[in-house]
Amino acid sequence: MSVTPSEPKRRRRGFEPAAGLLKDRIRQAGESRGFAVARLLTHWAEVVGDEVAAMARPVKVGYGREGFGATLTLLTTGAAAPVLQMQLPKIREKVNACYGYNAISRVVITQTAPLGFAEGQVAFAPAPRPAPPAPDPAIRREAAALSGEVQDATLRAALEALGEKVLSRPGPKKG
């Protein structure tokens, strides 16, 4: 049975990678902002480095009327703008390496407060999670007693750690 152009393609059986399902939507969203290469958005930290990626995010690529290179607009907070300004030539060089040719002729920085308009909300890196509190010694003893008959030391240690987490959970105890 051959597939004609009017028939939809058959989907593979089983799981499909999420990247394949979202590829067209990501490309459309990127192109609406002027990003011809979606890799610049999806791999921003790899393109410019972790230090710059923590300070700035690409917002759009604007093309001039003459067509002699585009302008990349980066969003950053006011405090990071001077540091980023000094690195603009390196950023332009790295972004052009991503494109494979001299696509970007200028890089412009736009600043915003950490909590601004919908697009200006700059939370470049998630806040680190606080360390969990140390378990109560009574809970540690109870977890050790529950896994005390296990002969394998590695399995016993894993069961003790699991027991500590279960016994230290807030809320009603099931048992």
Image (cartoon, grey):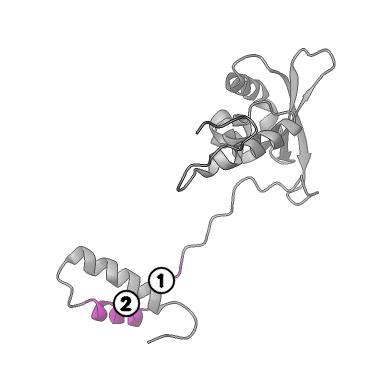
From the top left corner, tell me how far across and down residue 158 is, in percent.
28, 66
Expressed as whole percent of the image width and height from the top left, the position of residue 104 reads 70, 19
Q: Residue furthest front?
A: 1
CA neighbours of label 2 inside 10 A, class few (<14), some (14 to 19), many (20+): some
Judged from this view, the residue extending furthest toward the left is 151
Q: Which residue is painted at 39% across and 75% down in the image? A: 166
Work out whether 38 lies above or below 103. Answer: below
Relative side of 172 to 58, left or right = left
Disc 1 element: loop
Residue at numbered disc 2: 140
Residue 65, image quadrant = top right
Front label number (2 vs 1): 2
**Residue 139 falls within the magenta-colored stretch:** yes
- Earlier in the chain: of badge 2 and badge 1, it is 1
Query: What percent of the width, then of the height, locates residue 35?
Result: 69, 29
Magenta stretch, main secondary structure, is: helix
Quarter of the figure with residue 47: top right
Residue 135 in view of the camera: no
The answer to if 15 sits in the magenta stretch is no
Q: What stretch is highlighted in magenta?
A: 132-147
Instruction: Label 2, secondary structure: give it.
Output: helix
